[in-house]
Amino acid sequence: MPLRSTEAGWGALVRVFHWSIALLILVQAVIGLSMVEMGLTPAKVRVFALHKSIGMTILALVLLRIAWRLGERRPADPPAMPRWQVRAARATHLALYLLILAIPLSGWWFNSASNAPLVWFGWFDLPSLTGGLDPVWKPRALLLHQTLFGLLVALLVVHVGAALWHHFKQRDEVLRRMVMGPRKKTGGG
């Protein structure tokens, strides 16, 4: 299993980033949607702290993924893939990257405007982005955070739907190379 991507498929590190971020986003969605229903208890404070820590982890992972991808080749598009699909896939991926960056940043902004501490898994404090309580920007940051999450959900439906369509309808390599990586060469070549 090659670490780096090849012409035939995504390398191991890109796939680890992809699936780790995907799993953490799913966890965040469950936590984020359930925590708003909780009463004001110590358990809710712990859940909020976990949500914030996971969000900052996602932010760090996506920054690392982007840094790694800048030096990576991207696998070739399937030969039969129409040009509009290639463009749509690239635009969708760019939008996903932007949202996955913007959502934790907007959460950090909301947290800062709320004057709440942001301690990454109890290990270290992250600085405030607002310098303390900001009652004007607090509701705006929350609305932005929620709106961006809604956009992410919609885009993920498109992304997952397209991957499944490629796999089951087109029967091409698009999904397989993100799951399995580059196909091993066979034969005497």
Image (spheres, grey):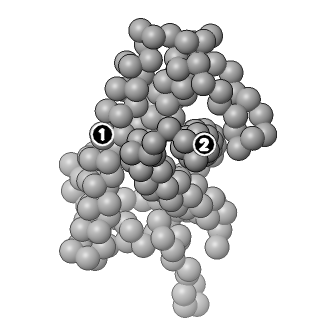
On-image quarter of the C terminus: bottom right
Residue shown at the point (39%, 45%) measured from the top left = 37
Amino acid type shown at disc 2: Pro
Residue 97 drawn at (x, y percent)? 45, 40
Judge whether residue 38 can be spotted in this image.
yes
Q: Above or below — where is 3 with respect to 39?
A: below
On-image quarter of the N terminus: bottom right
Q: Above or below — where is 160 with respect to 103?
A: below
Residue 132 drawn at (x, y percent)? 60, 12
- How much space separates mark 1 and mark 2, taking CA atoms? 31 Å
Which of 182 and 115 lies nearest the eye of the viewer? 115
Q: Which of the 4 image quadrants contains residue 62? A: top right
Which of 41 and 61 lies nearest the eye of the viewer? 41
What is the secondary structure assignment of the residue under circle 1? helix
Residue shown at the point (59%, 61%) measured from the top left = 16
Q: Say left or right for 99 vs 101.
A: left
Q: Which of the 4 image quadrants contains residue 167? A: bottom left
Q: Residue lying farthest right?
A: 123
Q: Which of the 4 image quadrants contains residue 188? A: bottom right
Residue that badge 1 annotates: 151
Residue that badge 2 annotates: 42
